[in-house]
Image (cartoon, coloured by chain):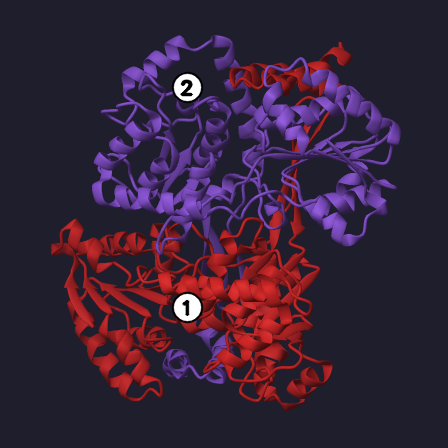
Chain colours: A purple, B red
Amino acid sequence: MKRLDWTAMDSGNRARALDRPGGGEQDGLEAAVRRIFNQVWADGDGALRALTRRFDNVEVADFAVSDAEFAEAEAGLDPVLRAAMIEAIGRLKAWHSAGMGQGFEVQTAPGVACGRLLRPIARVGLYVPAGTAPLPSTALMLGVPAALAGCPQVVLCTPPRADGRADPAVLVAAKLCGMGQVYKLGGAQAIAAMALGTDSVPRCDKLFGPGNRYVTAAKQYAAMMAGGPAIDMPAGPSEVLVIADAGAPPAHVAADLLSQAEHGPDSQVILATDSLALLDAVELEVRRQLAELPRRDIAGKALQHARLFQVANLDEAFALSNDYAPEHLILALREPRAWLDKVQSAGSVFLGDYAPEGLGDYCSGTNHVLPTHGAARAWSGVSVASFQKAISYQEVSQAGLAAIGPCAVVMARAEGLEAHAQSVLRRLEGVA
Amino acid sequence: MKRLDWTAMDSGNRARALDRPGGGEQDGLEAAVRRIFNQVWADGDGALRALTRRFDNVEVADFAVSDAEFAEAEAGLDPVLRAAMIEAIGRLKAWHSAGMGQGFEVQTAPGVACGRLLRPIARVGLYVPAGTAPLPSTALMLGVPAALAGCPQVVLCTPPRADGRADPAVLVAAKLCGMGQVYKLGGAQAIAAMALGTDSVPRCDKLFGPGNRYVTAAKQYAAMMAGGPAIDMPAGPSEVLVIADAGAPPAHVAADLLSQAEHGPDSQVILATDSLALLDAVELEVRRQLAELPRRDIAGKALQHARLFQVANLDEAFALSNDYAPEHLILALREPRAWLDKVQSAGSVFLGDYAPEGLGDYCSGTNHVLPTHGAARAWSGVSVASFQKAISYQEVSQAGLAAIGPCAVVMARAEGLEAHAQSVLRRLEGVA
């Protein structure tokens, strides 16, 4: 953990202190991903089998999870976990449905009705990581809004285990969200399969979900293909920024920093506080709590590049945070709601001493698929809107054309587009 | 123009008939764009001046449009065009503001308030093509929603003319939308400048607007940069699909096809009709009208790959259209409103015989920056939401934590994330 006095730093040093690592050494990765896409394009399911053999060390005859495998997963799952997932789904549904957009229509001139329709994206592909840590929660975070949007085809890919089966908790999570099309495919080959389509895996219009470097690079590669699928957002390592005042309980703040650090060695952990006493206490607490964690090796590595900023006042802390645009922002403040107005860029905000990030990760109701690496400056977390597209329309009567047509003719001719003008004028002649 | 009997075609032939051209030969383009980005990264404004000299054949000392140049543009512009732009802005404002999203908050459990805030993207960069055909309408289409979103910094780049000045109509359009930061920069170097920032051009969080192949490739390159800007959407050649019944006036349908064809030789023009008589009549009309057009050479080239589909019935036409996902969809039908429900994928829809695409291009109120090349399957046209991001939040009381904390603990432990569980448990101990 590195301590920095924000107030004393100049703007160049501030920018460097908020820099995220990496980004430069993606070239080898892109070439590897390109090869995988070419292979899947050429050989379809055969390529998927070969790649699964190579990367997952397992022979999978049929990628699609069978009814029998779903049933076994259901039967074998801890009922406490199942109940927790059902409980989480309830709150996810409440929040996501409350935030759903609506179509609208407005008369912009007499006889000119302009509106917008929302439509579900027809074929969506979800990726749920597994491997060392299967993430059934991610299946819920993607499955619930996909179901609320009404997407007719929802495909989920998740890597096979060494025994050729999918993680049972992921399967139950999928089923609880109404998904039946689950494929045991991981890595870049899963993304290639959903982007290109094969005999067994349907081609998708948009791809969602987190993943390792290969999955991320594959999603970006797919998004670059002409006519290729859209993606939910660019992905980077997970990150938290905590703004704490003198009244924040150091043990809570430390636990929040550690819960981010345990994600991976490249997790980003930042604290900004106006209290030197709190900063000291948190540093002590982090060391104490770290020793007790099963994933202390991972968390310890992440903490090596953690940054603890001392700021002159909380306004400075919010300026710092808005510059950084964190994925998760915890406001460990006495009046957190009063400070919410200051937040300009963040994925999700946690207000007060009783809102650890873990609640948003699992079951408060908000979505945990959030923009990282500064993407919160321009991107939003996943919501039902991520599974929809808007279609605008205009219905124009004869009178409407007479009212607005001449304006279009003037502008079309100013741009040298006479055929545009004529498409209006020919109709106006008919009207007159 | 190629006639095809849709009903008689098998699925493979149908897919090929709806194929869009190109996409494969982007490699040289990407390398060129990469060089330009590297140059701008290394040399900033010096590189911009050198690239402008090379590509635009003009020496521009100061890229920023001065107050004097704005004033001259205002003074010199045809007042009829100025009035048309003001009229268009009025309807653009009406439609875009009616469609603006709202924040919301919902209690997902007692003591757990979850909501979402909308925030303007802080720094947005707009690109407005010029060259042979300056597009002041595009400045309006981007400037109006940016202003409604309240983006604090709106930057606009547009190529310099041979005399080193910007197109006056584009400047007046920018001013009418409240934009004062206009830079005379075109092509990939304009995108690189807004993506990376230089001494004179601010770095932007999201880039908008159409452009040639270099601009498009540069936007995609920028979107791939780790920590780089978001982009509005992938771009391809403009396209229209007209669904017409026997009652559609052939002269109108032909004019619509031609108004799309005049955009460029790679424009996509498609007709689907259940009336052979209409198909014959439209073909005749297209030839007749084409001869009268100033841009008949361009339109003629685009028409070479136009496709006229005969369908057995209108349901088939809508299935075809939803497969193709056109940027513009014209419903030249007797009861167009009744058919709107069938539209699943399209950028913007034009209902009836009095709604030529030109109205949406300029002044009905809807946005003309729309998804092309099938992107309408997953993307939406530009709206105020394109200039905003959503931030989720959760405020949790002691009671709220007691209510939902245990659920999070179960799920965290199922995923092997003990520090996540501890961040909840340490707080629950305090509560108990």
Judged left or right of residue A192, residue B221 is right
Q: Nearer the viewer, residue B108 or B264?
A: B264
| Point 38% across, 40% down: residue | A124
The amino acid at mark 2 is Val
The amino acid at mark 1 is Arg
Q: Nearer the viewer, mark 1 or mark 2?
A: 1
- Quadrant in the picture for the N terminus of chain B: bottom left
Percent across and percent down for residue A28 are 42, 45
Please tell me whether residue A348 is drawn above or below residue A264 in the rendered image. below
Percent across and percent down for residue B62 are 67, 79
Q: Residues within 10 Å of mark 1 (few under 14, many from 20)?
A: some
Please tell me whether residue B332 is drawn above or below residue A12 in the rendered image. below
What's the CA distance linking mark 1 and mark 2? Answer: 46 Å
Q: Quadrant of residue B65?
A: bottom right
| Point 24% across, 37% down: residue | A47
Q: Residues within 10 Å of mark 2 (few under 14, many from 20)?
A: many
Judged left or right of residue B11, residue B361 is right
Percent across and percent down for residue B410 are 56, 14
Percent across and percent down for residue A141 are 51, 30
Which label sits on residue A76? none
* Residue B145 at least partly seen: no
Label 2 element class? helix
The residue pinned by badge 1 equals: B213
| Point 66% across, 45% down: residue | A19
Instruction: Indicate the chain on which mark 1 is placed.
Output: B
Say how many tags the image has. 2
Please tell me whether residue B344 is drawn above or below residue A134 in the rendered image. below
- Quadrant in the picture for the C terminus of chain B: top right
Label 1 element class? helix
The residue pinned by badge 2 equals: A172
Q: Nearer the viewer, residue A187 or B287?
A: A187
Mark 1–mark 2 contact, CB under 8 Å?
Answer: no
